[in-house]
Amino acid sequence: MKVLVPVKRVLDYNVKPRVKADGTGVDLANVKMSMNPFDEIAIEEAVRLKEKGAASEVVVVTIGVPKAETDILLTARAMGADRAILIATDDEVEPLAVAKLLAKVAQEEQPGLIILGKQAIDDDANQTGQMLAALLGWAQGTFASKVEVNGERVSVTREVDGGLETVDLKLPAIVTTDLRLNEPRYATLPNIMKAKSKPVAKKTIADYGVDVAPRLKTLKVVEPGKRQAGVKVGSVDELVERLKGLGVAK
Ligand code: AMP
């Protein structure tokens, strides 16, 4: 069984985002970019399935800038992916268009399982996996904290409000990863060196004949409001009095 893992290049999670002066978006010039952390978890899971003998090949795909070939797609191959597909574009692509492109890749590659991150930490959309499942007509197990492949089926334990839910899906299926699914391995230097010889297929959006015209318009991006400075109170009684003043306590 082949496993397909879509990965997105995002602002590194350690970087504090700066909003552009004209309010049109986040400034990405000269800042560190990395693989979306949930996608590292997705690769780790796919590689573990291969190590267990449940998967035969791990293919990663990204829709993004050409530079992705030498950063996130290299990391992905160093972590254990066998090959990569780069669908190069300098434009931002919305989740629906990403899902349409991934559906085309799935039709070509015929994977048994597609493992995505539950969300990309840049726009927190949490849409692509669900839309992809709908477009392909496949079953989906989202927010996975455990994945077990049993023959023609996959059992996915999901983190839901108030507990865990386990769903049993027929393959081919879509899984999206939650934080507790696994702890991704590091891409070591020797593996990064070896990964350079693993193939990357270079494509463009035009190769897939998909309409990626934006459906959404960003009106304005603003910095979060600054927090007001706190006040130290002398006693519990004073705290209660102040809370009463705010209408919080009675
Ligand atoms: P989102 O729906 O944007 O929050 O993204 C959810 C997941 O979809 C990500 O964790 C990736 O696995 C995948 N994804 C989103 N955008 C892209 C992209 N441009 N290229 C490849 N995979 C993507």
Image: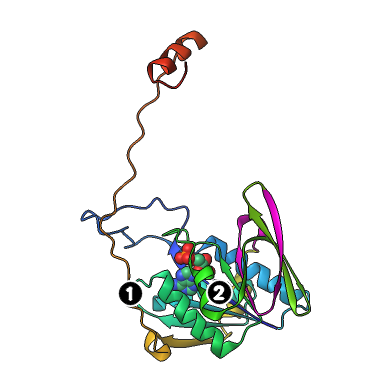
Q: Residue 73 in the image: state x and y as whole percent.
A: 52, 75
Q: Nearer the viewer, mark 2 or mark 1?
A: 2
* Residue 152 appears in the figure: yes
Amino acid type shown at disc 2: Ala
Query: How many numbered badges does the structure rendering display?
Result: 2
Secondary element at tag 2 = helix
Q: Is residue 179 covered in magenta?
A: yes
Q: Residue 54 in the image: state x and y as whole percent.
A: 76, 78
- Mark 1 sits on what residue? 91
Amino acid type shown at disc 1: Asp
Secondary element at tag 1 = loop
Please, is residue 129 above or below residue 212 in the view? above
Which of the labelled discs sits on residue 152, or is there none? none
Q: Residue 223 in the image: state x and y as whole percent.
A: 31, 47
Q: Nearer the viewer, residue 141 or 70?
A: 141
Q: CA distance from mark 2 to mark 1?
A: 24 Å
Residue 15 horizontal side relative to residue 76, left or right: left
Please, is residue 57 above or below residue 117 in the view? below
Q: Residue 209 in the image: state x and y as whole percent.
A: 39, 89
Q: Is residue 158 covered in magenta?
A: no
Q: Residues within 10 Å of mark 1 (few under 14, many from 20)?
A: few
Residue 115 horizontal side relative to residue 50, left or right: left
Residue 100: which quarter of the image? bottom left
Which residue range is magenta in the image? 163-184
Q: Is disc 1's CB within 8 Å of ligand 1?
A: no
Residue drawn at x 51%, y 81% as measured from the top left: 103
- Mark 2 sits on what residue? 133
Colour setup of the view: rainbow
Residue 50: which quarter of the image? bottom right
Residue drawn at x 47%, y 13% as measured from the top left: 240
